[in-house]
Amino acid sequence: ILAINSGGTLSLSDGPASDLVVNGTLSLNNNGILNGSGTVLVNSSAIFNWSAGTIGGSVSTNISTSATLNITGIGGTATLNNSAPIINSGGTINWTGAGNINCSAAGSNVSISNGGSFLMNATANFTNTSGGIFFITNSSSGSILRNVAGNTTITANVGFVNQGSFTNSLSTSTITIQ
């Protein structure tokens, strides 16, 4: 288990020698920072727990098939910041809790690309407080499922592209795209 806790920073440099390969569990906790220009590869059966904190720089986070990214929103907002952090998932993204996913990368392109399963069960929002470009893309192989009561808003400064399946299974659950 590798944990980046409150006030802690892990910086990655560009190049395969400095990439972070996760075969177990990586945790990014409240106010921790994962920063730099390298790649985080969450291998099959591995877990990345993001319970707030910041992914910054131009870090590319790749969630492999059978791997899981848990975004819990415990203790605050999960933030994508600085140059152009990217999350690519072919595995599972579980978003639960009440913490927003926020882009604060002014003038940059930030994206979450789903080609696996995105369980959007948070009662929180996708926000963009920077004026940068923030896109959420569900590819043709991706699926988004929501099965929790409450509302999630994709705010006006966040782009949403759905080429895959999108299921909202509860009448008391709403997703608002502004």
Image (tube, rainbow, N blue to C red):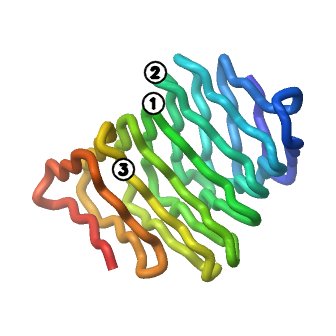
The residue labelled by disc 3 is 138
Which image quarter: residue 88? top right
Looking at the image, residue 153 lies above or below residue 54: below
Position above or below: 136 against 103: above
Q: The residue under label 3 is which amino acid type?
A: Asn
Q: CA distance from mark 3 to mark 1?
A: 12 Å
Looking at this view, is 57 or 101 the one in front?
Answer: 57
Vertical arrangement, residue 59 with respect to residue 20, above or below: below
* Residue that label 2 marks: 66
Report, in whole angstroms, how far the alpha carbon at label 1 lies from the one at label 2.
Answer: 5 Å
Where residue 84 sits in the image (x, y, percent)? 69, 60
Real-space CA distance between mark 3 and mark 2, rounded to the nearest whole angstrom: 17 Å
Mark 1 or mark 2: whose residue is earlier in sequence: 2
Q: Amino acid at mark 2?
A: Ser
> Which quadrant is home to the C terminus?
bottom left
Category of crowding for the residue at label 1, using alpha-carbon neighbours closer than 10 angstroms: few (below 14), some (14–19), many (at least 20): many
